[in-house]
Image (cartoon, rainbow, N blue to C red):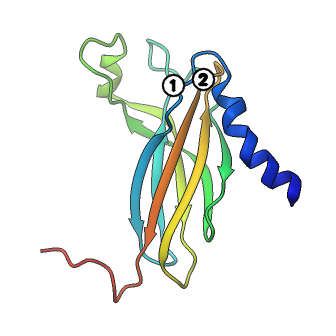
Amino acid sequence: MRARRLLALILPALLLALPGQSAEPEKVVRSVLPGETVRVYVAYHVLRDCSPIGEIRLTVIEPPAQGQISLQGTTIRGGFSYNNPRYHCNQRQIAASEVLYEAPGKGEGLMRTRFGIVFADGEIKLIDAEITVWAPSSAPKSE
């Protein structure tokens, strides 16, 4: 357990020491009901012909206090800007990976987690996620 805690402390620094890595993690905020699953993040990395560059891996640096983080394959429409050579990929389904958070069946509160998305070319994207688990009686009412 001590080794895992130590690794959680030094891994972000090690990841950021690699060339081309951003110093600031991307912040993501989500909410979910107990026992439900929510998509926290989606990642894709494709060539100009819209085929995937390679496998995308998930490294959980700080797991949530409750619940579980996982990675699953999916397909989505791309979100490339007009001046990107992959813009035409927006018109078709492309391979992607989604990070999911499965909330525990009971309880509520704010769950924080940090994870890294590791792309096949070595690029690493750090994500800080805050996930609020709402009990059905305390969930915000939509208007």
Report the residue marked by disc 2: 123
- Which residue occupies the foreground of this view, 10 or 33? 10
Q: For the residue labelled by badge 1, is the local secondary structure a helix, a strand or a loop?
A: loop
Q: Classify mark 2: helix, strand or loop.
A: loop
Quadrant housing residue 90? top left
Q: Determine whether 111 is above or below 115 in the image.
A: below
Residue 71, image x and y in percent? 61, 48
Q: To which quarter of the image does residue 29 belong?
A: bottom left
Label of residue 9 in the image: none
> Of 1 and 36, which appears nearest the observer?
1
Does 27 sit above or below residue 21?
below
| Image location (x, y in percent) of residue 134 | 40, 77
Q: Which residue is mark 1?
A: 45
Q: In the rendered view, tell whether residue 59 sits above or below residue 136.
A: above
Q: Amino acid at mark 1?
A: His
Residue 34 at what x, y percent from top left? 48, 78
The three-letter code of the residue at mark 2 reads Glu
Q: Residue at x 46, y 63 (%)?
A: 131
Quarter of the C terminus within the rendering: bottom left
Quarter of the image where the N terminus is located: bottom right
Q: Residue at 61% across / 57% down in the picture? A: 69
